[in-house]
Image (tube, rainbow, N blue to C red):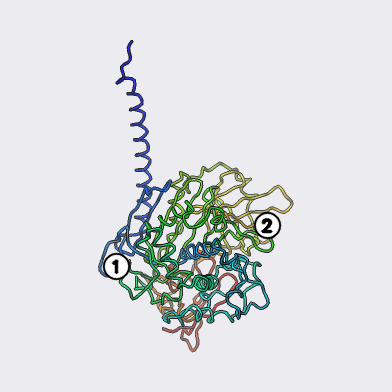
């Protein structure tokens, strides 16, 4: 039989067609999964988000959800501009590495080389310590930020604000997220380059990369497509004012998800610094004792189901952000939001996991006998101070941290259990004299051992009259600018800290209430039969809160 040219290529055409159809179906399936997650989180009548997913440098998903302006009911657009908060640290880090490549500084330079009068308490604090949050310098955002929030300050004035505070620890001894370190890095960039931080980033990063919708933040300038920022306080409110001179090199920048994609591509292709240089930013740096920090220079080091990632988030008055890059898969996910009420961290991780076809929540459950489950029950104390009770009820194993909410845990193997709707796992080791457990949340893990303590009885809520509950409604000041608001809805007390999610609180007595989701309780204090204050018990701490309203 003679085979014609037409008939000989037909199978190839069909194969290519089927391959294209298969890829299209996969992409469509991904899009639907992304849409479902995001539509559930960012509702059309509230503050929203913009989202970008890229593979092999190409954008495969770019959408917007919710409102850019709640008051005017303006829908979010994919090119809206947001304050990106601490994602700024990536830009500061690369700026430092650019100056290093130019021979103008060394990572091991002490900060007194650039600020001779900085009080280091005879400790050696280097640029390396500033970049990876191990300097021990007091972070100014842990001080009373509300007293300076509206004040414009120069970098020198800002450094003077925190430099005389006692150090939290010796350099390199611990890891503690630190915004002060990045303020000093911004000052060093200015001193070496002779430019303002704003001009250096604009001229050396934004312009060369055509990041045309990225800026040093400003509350005064007209910024096209700026999404308005919101906070929650018994509903949405406009974000509190913050002078953009304060976040500075730690969190002052504004951008879009598309510009962040340009940034990530430039980082990947060594456009600004050499490959061996950018590796320094992605390294998992260590403490003096050799323990990992899970942080490099402006990026944290993590993993998704065993696949390494580099990532970072940001939070600033009215905005939250998160982005993840997966080098092995060349996948980049960025989400920017215009409210501090709906963090994108977990949903960014879930979307990235879907993009590499390693979704969370799809772990296979294995059957484990009741007798084997019983061996795992007990109270475990972990090296990070956490105490977890492992209990068994009706064939289901539960984990409860301190006296918080109980979470179902499911077996992947006889000794490895994963948490319901979470990224966490517990690995039990029962073949030793002292049973052990390892709690793992993605790349981070902490080891613990079984104690002889009994599993604590579950707290039970009692009934308290509406008249008594109404006495507790009000605002309680924990510190200036940070309050606890107690409201009453349908005979249920609701507690909400400034800028945080609200939680129902349940009475265990007429004056003491507990939270089911985590280990915390609140005691109301009366004087002359009038509620004058409250005491928050959480994490072994006792925090008084004066009633101010």
Q: Residues within 10 Å of mark 2 (few under 14, many from 20)?
A: some
Alpha-carbon distance for marks 1 and 2?
A: 50 Å
Label 1 secondary element: loop
- Specify the quadrant that holds the N terminus: top left
Residue that extends furthest to the bottom in the rendered view of this protein:
528
Which is more toward the observer, 169 or 388?
Answer: 169
Image mark count: 2
Give the camera-side residue of 270 and 324: 270
Residue at image mark 1: 70
Residue 194 is marked as: none
Q: Secondary structure at mark 2?
A: strand
Between 226 and 367, the one lying in front of the other is 226
Compared across the picture, whether 381 is left or right of 250 comes to right
Q: 245 left or right of 114?
A: left
Q: Residues within 10 Å of mark 1 (few under 14, many from 20)?
A: many
Q: Point out residue 188 in the picture as x, y percentages from the top left corner.
A: 53, 72
Tell me if 512 is positioned left or right of 78 in this view: right
Quadrant housing residue 285: bottom right
Q: For the point 67% across and 74% down, which residue is it?
A: 123
The image shows residue 449, relative to residue 412, as above or below, that is: below
- Which residue is at a point 29% across and 21% down the rendered structure image? 6
Residue 465: x, y in percent?
42, 75
Determine which residue is flagged by label 2. Answer: 449
Which x, y percent locates residue 460? 51, 65
State the quadrant of the C terminus: bottom left
Q: Is residue 486 left or right of residue 174?
A: left
Which label sits in the foreground, 1 or 2? 1
Say above or below: 61 vs 49. above
Which of the two labelled residues, at mark 1 and mark 2, occupies the earlier sequence position?
1
């Amino acid at each position: 039989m003679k085979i014609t040219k037409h008939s000989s290529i037909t199978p190839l055409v069909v194969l290519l067609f089927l391959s294209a159809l298969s890829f299209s179906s996969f992409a469509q399936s991904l899009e639907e999964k992304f849409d479902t997650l995001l539509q559930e989180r960012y509702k059309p009548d509230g503050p929203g988000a913009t989202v970008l997913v890229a593979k092999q440098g190409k954008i495969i998903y770019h959408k917007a959800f919710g409102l850019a302006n709640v008051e005017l009911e303006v829908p979010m657009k994919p090119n809206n501009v947001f304050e990106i908060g601490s994602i700024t640290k990536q830009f500061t880090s690369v700026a430092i590495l650019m100056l290093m490549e130019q021979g103008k500084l060394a990572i091991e330079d002490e900060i007194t080389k650039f600020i001779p009068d900085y009080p280091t308490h005879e400790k050696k604090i280097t640029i390396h310590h500033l970049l990876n949050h191990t300097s021990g310098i007091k972070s100014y955002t842990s001080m009373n930020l509300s007293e300076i929030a509206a004040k414009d300050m120069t970098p020198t004035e800002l450094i003077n604000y925190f430099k005389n505070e006692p150090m939290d620890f010796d350099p390199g001894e611990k890891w503690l997220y630190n915004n002060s370190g990045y303020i000093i890095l911004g000052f060093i960039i200015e001193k070496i380059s002779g430019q303002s931080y704003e001009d250096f980033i604009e001229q050396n990063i934004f312009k060369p990369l055509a990041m045309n919708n990225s800026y040093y933040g400003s509350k005064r300038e007209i910024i096209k497509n700026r999404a308005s920022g919101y906070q929650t306080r018994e509903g949405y409110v406009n974000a509190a004012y913050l002078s953009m001179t304060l976040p500075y090199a730690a969190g002052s920048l504004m951008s879009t998800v598309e510009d962040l994609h340009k940034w990530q591509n430039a980082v990947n292709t060594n456009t600004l610094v050499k490959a061996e240089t950018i590796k320094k930013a992605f390294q998992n740096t260590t403490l003096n004792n050799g323990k990992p920090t899970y942080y490099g220079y402006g990026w944290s080091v993590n993993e998704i189901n065993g696949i390494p990632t580099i990532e970072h988030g940001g939070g600033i008055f009215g905005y939250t952000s998160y982005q993840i890059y997966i080098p092995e898969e060349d996948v980049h996910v960025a989400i920017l939001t215009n409210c501090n009420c709906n963090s994108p961290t977990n949903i960014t991780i879930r979307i990235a996991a879907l993009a590499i076809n390693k979704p969370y929540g799809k772990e296979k459950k294995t059957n484990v006998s009741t007798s084997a489950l019983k061996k795992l029950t007990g109270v475990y104390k972990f090296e990070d101070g956490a105490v977890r009770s492992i209990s068994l009820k009706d064939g289901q194993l539960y984990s409860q941290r301190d006296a918080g909410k109980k979470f179902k845990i499911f077996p992947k193997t006889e000794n490895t259990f994963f948490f319901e709707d979470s990224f966490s796992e517990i690995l039990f080791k029962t073949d030793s004299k002292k049973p052990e457990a390892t709690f793992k949340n993605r790349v981070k893990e902490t080891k613990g051992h079984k104690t002889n303590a009994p599993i604590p009885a579950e707290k039970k809520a009692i009934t308290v009259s509406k008249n008594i509950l109404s006495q507790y409604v009000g605002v309680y000041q924990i510190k200036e600018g940070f309050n606890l608001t107690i409201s009453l809805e349908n005979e249920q007390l609701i507690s909400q800290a400034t800028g945080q999610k609200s939680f129902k609180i349940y009475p265990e007595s007429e004056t003491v209430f507990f939270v089911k989701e985590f280990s915390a309780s609140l005691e109301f204090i009366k004087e002359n039969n009038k509620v004058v204050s409250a005491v928050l018990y959480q994490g072994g701490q006792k925090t008084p809160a004066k009633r101010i309203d």
